[in-house]
Image (cartoon, rainbow, N blue to C red):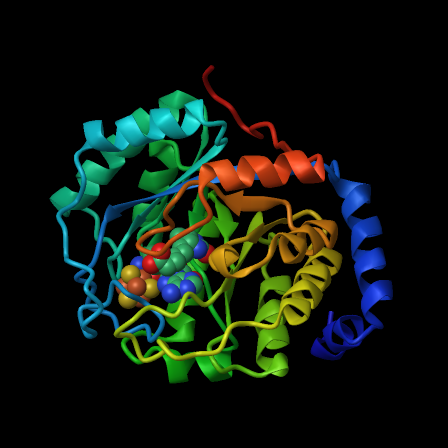
């Protein structure tokens, strides 16, 4: 698929676009099921990288304090609660540039993963850069999917991050694929990129082999103290167009309506679900930023007749 194909799909008249996305969606998924994922920051703040959107970079004064890696028991408490609340995916994030085999902190994370994976939720982690050796260890410990976003187009990336490259991101994704983990990869919109940048990002995702298992679409949460703190909110119709286009070109991927739901109306979210978004982060907090509360999401699901998606790969009750 060429970039021009994506541009053509994206610029289809709005209602035609979302109807087409809906038909593609219903061919592959139950249209009333949305996956609930709980996120937990197991290592917050103090990151060496300069990602211009991120409250956890040590380069900016964002008020986020650097914390130590969470103990396994504490992570398990949160994971059990997430499961009781109906989450079927549990994603642990660390504010690291990457991980290195043999580092005791990585060994600790592997131990945590072994325990969490016994709970029967899909286990996802996002720990930064990896090589194949660490990817294999994660897979063996019980990780189903590894989240590593390309975030924006290759051209725009260097305006957002200077401490690592777009190619570094792709190398990690290749290591994840070789180890046989699912790739969870998407990006952020609302960082001053053009419509073309958004579609170039999506185009890169369509070149992955195998295709990404899930695609998180984050709307920038403008974090105070970061270079992006004053960015304007994303236009809801642009977001829905991008979701619809993603659904059409990656029909089997879970499309996750990720960060930024606190700034979307209920109607905006309904349109995103209609157009094929079928996964959300569930719980009051993302990593450091706010997310709609559990009560608000339960109410929204009730109003829209949506139900939580069943786990795809439960290994235990
Ligand atoms: N350090 C690892 C990495 O960079 O891959 C894992 C954690 S990092 C916080 C995970 C992803 O969160 C980023 O790639 C980005 O897509 C998203 N993210 C971070 N801050 C965000 C913000 N302010 N608004 C929206 N998405 C954000
Ligand atoms: C993803 O694409 N979005 C999540 C998850 N992967 C790790 C992170 C969103 C972070 C939002 C900003 C924050 O909480 O600091
Ligand atoms: Fe560090 Fe990840 Fe935040 Fe970049 S996005 S500063 S790598 S935690």
Question: Which quadrant of the frame does ligand 3 lie within?
Answer: bottom left
Q: Which of the 4 image quarters holds residue 9?
A: bottom right
Q: Is residue 279 left or right of residue 28?
A: left
Q: Is residue 174 above or below residue 2?
A: above
Q: Residue at x 39, y 83 (%)?
A: 158
User: For this rendering, which residue is in front, 110 or 91?
Assistant: 91
Q: Is residue 139 left or right of residue 195?
A: left
Q: Which of the 4 image quarters holds residue 98?
A: bottom left
| Coordinates of residue 238 in the picture (x, y in percent) | 66, 71
| Coordinates of residue 289 in the picture (x, y in percent) | 35, 56
Q: Residue at x 79, y 56 (%)?
A: 21
| Coordinates of residue 83 in the picture (x, y in percent) | 43, 26
Q: Is residue 129 visible?
A: no
User: For this rendering, which residue is in front, 190 or 249?
Assistant: 190
Q: Is residue 295 visible?
A: yes
User: For this rendering, which residue is in front, 213 or 66?
Assistant: 66
Q: Quadrant of the N terminus?
A: bottom right
Number of on-image labels: 0
User: For this rendering, which residue is in front, 185 or 31?
Assistant: 31
| Coordinates of residue 220 in the picture (x, y in percent) | 45, 68
Q: Residue at x 75, y 72 (%)?
A: 10
Q: Is residue 146 left or right of residue 26?
A: left
């Amino acid at each position: 698929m060429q970039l021009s194909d994506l541009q053509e799909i994206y610029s289809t008249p709005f209602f035609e676009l979302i109807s087409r996305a809906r038909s593609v969606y219903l061919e592959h998924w139950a249209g009333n099921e949305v996956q609930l994922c709980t996120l937990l920051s197991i290592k917050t703040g103090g990151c060496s990288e300069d990602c211009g959107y991120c409250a956890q970079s040590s380069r900016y004064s964002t008020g986020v304090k650097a914390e130590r890696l969470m103990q396994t028991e504490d992570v398990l408490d949160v994971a059990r609660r997430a499961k009781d609340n109906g989450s079927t995916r549990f994603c642990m994030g660390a504010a690291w540039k990457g991980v290195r085999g043999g580092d005791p902190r990585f060994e600790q994370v592997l131990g945590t993963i072994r325990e969490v994976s016994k709970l029967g939720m899909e286990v996802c982690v996002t720990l930064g850069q990896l090589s194949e050796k660490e990817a294999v260890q994660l897979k063996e410990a019980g990780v189903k999917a590894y989240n590593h976003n390309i975030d924006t187009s290759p051209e725009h990336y260097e305006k957002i991050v200077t401490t690592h490259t777009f190619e570094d991101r792709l190398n990690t994704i290749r290591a994840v694929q070789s180890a046989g983990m699912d790739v969870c990869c998407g990006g952020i919109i609302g960082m001053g990129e053009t419509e073309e940048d958004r579609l170039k990002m999506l185009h890169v995702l369509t070149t992955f082999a195998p295709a990404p298992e899930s695609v998180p679409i984050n709307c920038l949460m403008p974090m105070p103290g970061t270079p992006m703190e004053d960015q304007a909110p994303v236009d809801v119709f642009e977001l829905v167009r991008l979701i619809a286009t993603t659904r059409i070109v990656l029909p089997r991927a879970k499309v996750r309506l990720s960060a930024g739901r606190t700034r979307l109306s209920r109607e905006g979210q309904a349109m995103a679900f209609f157009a094929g978004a079928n996964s959300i982060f569930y719980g009051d907090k993302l990593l450091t930023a706010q997310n709609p509360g559990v009560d608000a999401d339960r109410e929204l699901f009730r109003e829209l007749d949506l139900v939580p998606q069943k786990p795809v790969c439960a290994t235990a009750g």
